[in-house]
Image (spheres, rainbow, N blue to C red):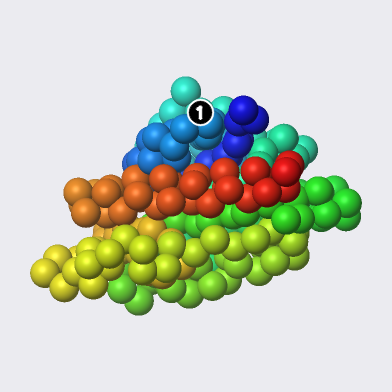
Amino acid sequence: MAVTKIYIVYYSLHGHVETMAREVLRGANSVPEVEATLWQVPETLPEKILEKVKAVPRPDDVADIRPEQMAEADGFMFGFPSRFGVMASQVMTFFDNTSGLWTTQALAGKPAGIFWSTGFHGGGQELTALTAVTKLAHHGMIFVPLGYTFGKSMYEMGEVKGGSPYGSGTYAADGSREPTELEIQQANYHGKYFAGIAKKLKKRSTA
């Protein structure tokens, strides 16, 4: 049986997106015949700035990804914090460096999903997702939204919960808030759901 390779590519400044990414990974790897791997996009901020904004140390067990490595995967999940309603500039820069893949449309037809972190309700829980889809479209990737497949928890009104039909998400507030148990469950489900679809698409393409 051919293994479906999923790359979970993320950027995390204060650890919120990393927490989500690791849960997405667990969910994806729970699907048989799926091999999911975590990757980070390279940092672009100088060390002095990172110290001033109290960035968390980058994990040693997650390698930086190079654009050309993207061609190896069957599907992708991209995670990022929001900056003014769009993905963080580090992720923007990474996509800017994928022009070689864009020229050849090497990623066309491959499924992609997204997850994110914002400061609060008006911080881009939906807008950040919508603006991210443009990157996927130009590469010809197939956007796989979460929809309302997470069930009744999508309608949770008893507590603050990130995410939307576009994907899973969390709120960071001033940086002190951590992803809740419900947000972590959603991220896990999101990874599992996406992996199942990526697996089906690969089987059809090789049939």
Residue positioned most to the front: 207
Question: Number of marks in the image?
Answer: 1
Where residue 89 sits in the image (x, y, percent)?
59, 57
Name the residue at 44% across, 37% down.
31
Residue positioned most to the right: 104
Name the residue at 76% across, 55% down.
108
Residue 13 makes an appearance in the image: no
Which image quadrant for residue 183?
bottom left
Q: Quadrant of the N terminus?
A: top right
Q: Is residue 144 above or below residue 48?
A: below
Name the residue at 63% across, 50% down.
201
Name the residue at 16% across, 73% down.
157
Left/right of residue 74 with respect to residue 190 in the rendered view:
right
Q: Secondary structure at mark 1?
A: loop
Q: Is residue 106 above or below residue 167?
A: above
CA neighbours of label 1 inside 10 A, class few (<14), some (14 to 19), many (20+): few
Is 30 in front, or is 7? 30
* Residue that numbered label 1 is attached to: 62
Q: Quadrant of the C terminus?
A: top right
Where residue 171 sits in the image (x, y, percent)?
30, 60
Residue 8 makes an appearance in the image: yes
Residue positioned most to the left: 158
Residue type indicated by callout 1: Val
Where residue 141 sits in the image (x, y, percent)?
69, 58
Where residue 159 sits in the image (x, y, percent)?
14, 66
Is 163 in front, or is 35? 35
Q: Is residue 163 above or below residue 106?
A: below
Which image quadrant for residue 25?
top left
